[in-house]
Image (spheres, grey):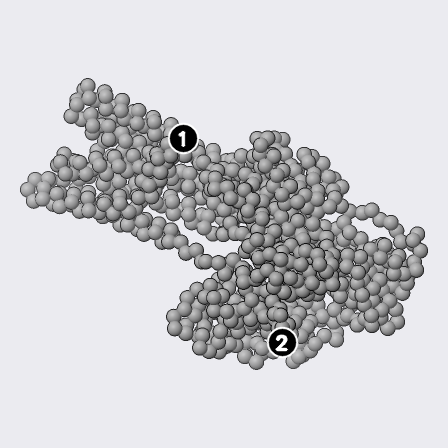
């Protein structure tokens, strides 16, 4: 039976959480805690209560009445400030924060009116989709620390991570690409205009002849920046490939570039023709459009981060004199004494100085059960402290901790990772290049026998018209549309290159905790004698004090806010909690703990062997029942596993124990292998073994413990309930509610490659048509000017339209 019963309650005016009839009251409004009441008072004092009119209960619960002054002390460090701010001129400073708590119009309105609360704030600008806040402030009036403390006080604490203290990587690639595209577009348009008389074969005698030379000179001048600037990346790539005794798609493209420009320059200077500079600049222009589409497609998310993205930006260090000071994590040294608070991550390998502490290693190992650590034991970086704060002694610097070893594995060092995907276009490039050169040489030999004066002209004409412009565009445009459709359906890819890896998948490896199951959403059920309202409050009061995650889940399920004060309370970590109240006592914990703390007979407590976890209850020395807590299986998992057809294999790897093995076997009986208690290294080695067997592995996981396996797999997918939250190094992030469509998304990625092959066929038809003109000596500037842009535009349209139609037929979303 379910124990949740009706208790008279009100809704917190600020955050919307339930609060009982005796809740805090101000101006006739109820608040669940002092924190929410404080935020309301701040907004009310500054006439900002419109915040509550835009959305009902828009705030977030603030379970503290203020900000610990020492917590953000590190923001007074000049080096830290310099690395966090975006811009500074005089006293005007701009800084951007990532704020996960932004979720509605009220949030946007309040954050863009911060200047009404903090005098030194000049303006605030929110990017709702990215959940970022840009603040411009006057450093002579306020400072960075004050602003962060204000944001934290009103419930919008910025997410500050260690990675922000690293050197900022400012890339000029995007700007450079735009400039190259602009130069090519400008020159292309003007050369087309200057070449118009040639298309119409207008009178070329007298003054017209002078204008022809003049415009030809302008065309050469305009084409030089395109050759030397806009096309230089293709020429460099081709030279690099040839230097390594290889051929990529940029080799035939560069041959076409050189042939187009060289032939045009020869014709203009010798007076034998008008050249093909319009086709040359148009060719480069369309190639750069394809590159821009490709870059824009996968520049939306940042994937490849490292351990610094997990760690907090600061920690409390205790000096030899006992004074506490907040310092940046990267300034920790061996031997420093530090304090880690509840729910904070340990930034470096340390030795516990407190008598004992409960830590959660699920971040590293995947094991969801907490571990009890006693004084003198080592705590590894990445552990999360549960319950009260813990004193520690730093044993290793952050960069030398166990946490960093995952990134020191060869899977992360392998520079071939970036080059592991050789696109289909690059694979056919050697054959294409050899074929074109063979046809060109054959044409040269044949025409040398027929009409030697035209032999070289025909030779260059073949190289020009066979240049694979459409071939180069088909892949980025198809994959660009594919990545866009995949993202609309909840799968966000790192780049277009990885689509090919996804399309080859034949083995799916799943992590359990956080991937197949959601430990944060345990289902809680009570079995036993009905509990009265007072007894419910007793259970809630004890579970609220407990540091154990199971107790926290029980407390959340009860929805009781009118808690009772215990006269005596103690807890044995990992076993249970005992509390005495005015008229009774309550014991909450394992079966063994209940037997040790009470006189209840062994036979009165059921010996249960159930999947999930069980928490027993004894009130007043009498056994009352137990709570069942089961990890919730993610929605859509059944559909996904059942959709894995023949030819695909499913594997389960988990750092957790085997308590859910039976449930998962029942859910999907066709697991190829199910392995539990796996360390991160074991997971990585298992993936490597599968690859050695010829499997093309897709790894689906989450958390740091899966990072090595995700990186080692052919295609790594990190499951996330929050797209803006960090995900380990992987090829894609998947929304948790998109799991049931994963097999369809794999099929769609395969279909996208069939579309690429179709576009290659269309491109080949254009090339064959052009070769017909070239081999017979009829390739005029007008024909070249029509065929080359037409092939490019038609390929762009074909790939985009066909990809979306295919996705629609497969039942996938194609528009936002």
C-alpha span from label 2 to label 1:
67 Å
* Secondary-structure class at tag 2: helix
Q: Residue at x 59, y 70 (%)?
A: 325
Disc on the earlier residue, 2 or 1? 2
Q: Residues within 10 Å of mark 2 (few under 14, many from 20)?
A: some
Q: Is residue 525 left or right of residue 776?
A: right
Q: Which residue is mark 2?
A: 38
**x, y (%) of residue 759?**
41, 34
Give the residue at x 54% y 52%.
Answer: 306
Residue at the spot x=76%, y=71% of the render?
Answer: 562
How packed mark 1 is, by other alpha carbons closer than 10 Å (few <14, some 14-19, many 20 or more), is few
Q: Any mark on residue 327, and which?
A: none
Residue 697, x across and y down, in percent: 58, 37
* Image position, residue 181 (x, y; %): 32, 49
Badge 1 is on which residue?
428
Give yes or no for contact between labels 2 and 1 (Cβ–Cβ under 8 Å).
no
User: Is residue 420 depicted above or below 609 in this figure?
Assistant: above
Does residue 600 appear left or right of residue 325 in this picture? right
Report the quarter where the N terminus lies. bottom right
- Residue 398 in sight from this viewpoint: yes
Residue 12 lies in quadrant? bottom right
């Amino acid at each position: 039976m379910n124990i949740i019963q009706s208790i008279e309650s009100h809704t917190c005016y600020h955050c919307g959480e339930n609060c009982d009839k005796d809740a805090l009251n101000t101006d006739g409004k109820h608040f669940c805690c002092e924190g929410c009441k404080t935020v309301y008072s701040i907004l009310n004092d500054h006439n900002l209560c419109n915040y509550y009119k835009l959305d009902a209960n828009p705030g977030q619960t603030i379970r503290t009445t203020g900000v610990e002054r020492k917590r953000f002390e590190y923001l007074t460090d000049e080096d830290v400030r310099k690395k966090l701010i975006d811009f500074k001129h005089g006293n005007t400073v701009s800084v951007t924060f990532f704020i996960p708590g932004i979720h509605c119009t009220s949030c946007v309105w309040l954050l863009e009116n911060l200047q009404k609360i903090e005098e030194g704030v000049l303006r605030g600008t929110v990017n709702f989709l990215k959940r970022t806040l840009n603040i411009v402030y006057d450093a002579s009036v306020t400072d960075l620390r004050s602003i962060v403390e204000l944001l934290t006080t009103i419930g919008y604490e910025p997410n500050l991570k260690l990675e922000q203290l690293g050197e900022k990587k400012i890339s000029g690639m995007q700007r450079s690409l735009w400039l190259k595209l602009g130069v090519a577009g400008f020159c292309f348009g003007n050369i087309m205009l200057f070449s118009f008389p040639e298309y119409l074969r207008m009178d070329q005698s007298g003054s017209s002849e002078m204008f022809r030379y003049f415009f030809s000179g302008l065309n050469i001048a305009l084409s030089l920046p395109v050759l030397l600037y806009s096309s230089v990346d293709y020429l460099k790539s081709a030279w690099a490939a040839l230097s390594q005794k290889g051929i990529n798609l940029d080799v035939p493209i560069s041959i076409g570039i050189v042939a187009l420009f060289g032939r045009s320059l020869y014709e203009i200077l010798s007076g034998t023709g008008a050249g093909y500079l319009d086709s040359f600049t148009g060719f480069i222009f369309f190639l750069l459009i394809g590159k821009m589409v490709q870059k824009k497609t996968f520049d939306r998310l940042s994937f490849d981060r490292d351990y610094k993205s997990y760690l907090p930006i600061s920690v409390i260090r205790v000096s030899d004199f006992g004074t506490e000071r907040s310092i940046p994590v990267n300034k920790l040294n061996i031997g420093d004494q530090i304090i880690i608070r509840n729910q904070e991550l340990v930034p470096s390998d340390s030795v516990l100085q407190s008598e004992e502490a409960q830590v959660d290693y699920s971040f590293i190992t995947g094991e969801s059960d907490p571990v009890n650590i006693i004084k003198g034991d080592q705590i590894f970086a990445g552990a999360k402290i549960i319950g009260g704060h813990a004193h520690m002694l730093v044993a290793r610097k952050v960069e030398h901790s166990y946490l960093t070893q995952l990134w020191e594995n060869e899977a992360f060092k392998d520079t071939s990772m970036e080059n592991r995907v050789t696109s289909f276009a690059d694979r056919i490039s050697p054959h294409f290049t050899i074929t074109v050169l063979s046809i060109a040489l054959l044409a040269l030999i044949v025409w040398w026998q027929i009409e030697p004066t035209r032999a070289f002209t025909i030779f260059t004409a073949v190289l020009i018209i066979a240049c694979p412009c459409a071939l180069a565009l088909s892949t980025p445009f198809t994959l660009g549309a594919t990545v866009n459709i995949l993202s609309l359906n909840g799968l966000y890819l790192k780049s277009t290159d990885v689509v090919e890896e996804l399309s080859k998948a034949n083995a799916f490896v799943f992590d359990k905790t956080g991937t197949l199951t959601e430990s944060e959403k345990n289902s809680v059920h009570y079995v036993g004698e009905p509990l009265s309202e007072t007894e419910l409050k007793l259970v809630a009061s004890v579970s609220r004090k407990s540091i154990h995650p199971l107790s926290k889940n029980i407390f959340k399920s009860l929805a009781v806010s009118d808690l009772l004060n215990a006269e005596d309370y103690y807890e044995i970590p990992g076993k249970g909690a005992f509390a005495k109240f005015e008229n009774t006592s309550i014991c909450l914990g394992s079966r063994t703990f209940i037997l040790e703390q009470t006189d209840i007979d062994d036979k009165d407590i059921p010996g249960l062997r159930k999947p999930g976890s069980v928490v027993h209850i004894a009130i007043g020395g009498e056994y009352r029942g137990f709570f069942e807590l089961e990890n919730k299986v993610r929605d859509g998992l059944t559909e996904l596993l059942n959709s894995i057809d023949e030819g695909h294999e499913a594997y389960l790897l988990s750092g957790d124990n085997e308590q859910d093995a039976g449930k998962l076997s029942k859910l999907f009986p066709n697991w190829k292998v199910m392995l539990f208690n796996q360390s991160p290294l074991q997971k990585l080695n298992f993936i490597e073994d599968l690859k050695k067997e010829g499997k093309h592995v897709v790894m689906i996981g989450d958390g740091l413990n899966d990072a090595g396996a995700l990186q080692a797999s052919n295609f790594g997918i990190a499951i996330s309930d929050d797209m803006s939250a960090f995900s380990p190094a992987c090829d894609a992030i998947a929304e948790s509610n998109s799991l049931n469509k994963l097999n369809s998304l794999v099929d769609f990625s395969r279909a996208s490659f069939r579309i690429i092959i179709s576009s290659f066929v269309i491109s080949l038809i254009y090339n064959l048509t052009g070769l017909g003109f070239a081999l017979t000596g009829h390739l005029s500037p007008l024909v070249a000017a029509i065929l080359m842009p037409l092939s490019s535009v038609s390929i762009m349209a074909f790939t985009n339209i066909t990809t979306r139609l295919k996705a629609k037929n497969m039942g996938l979303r194609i528009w936002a």
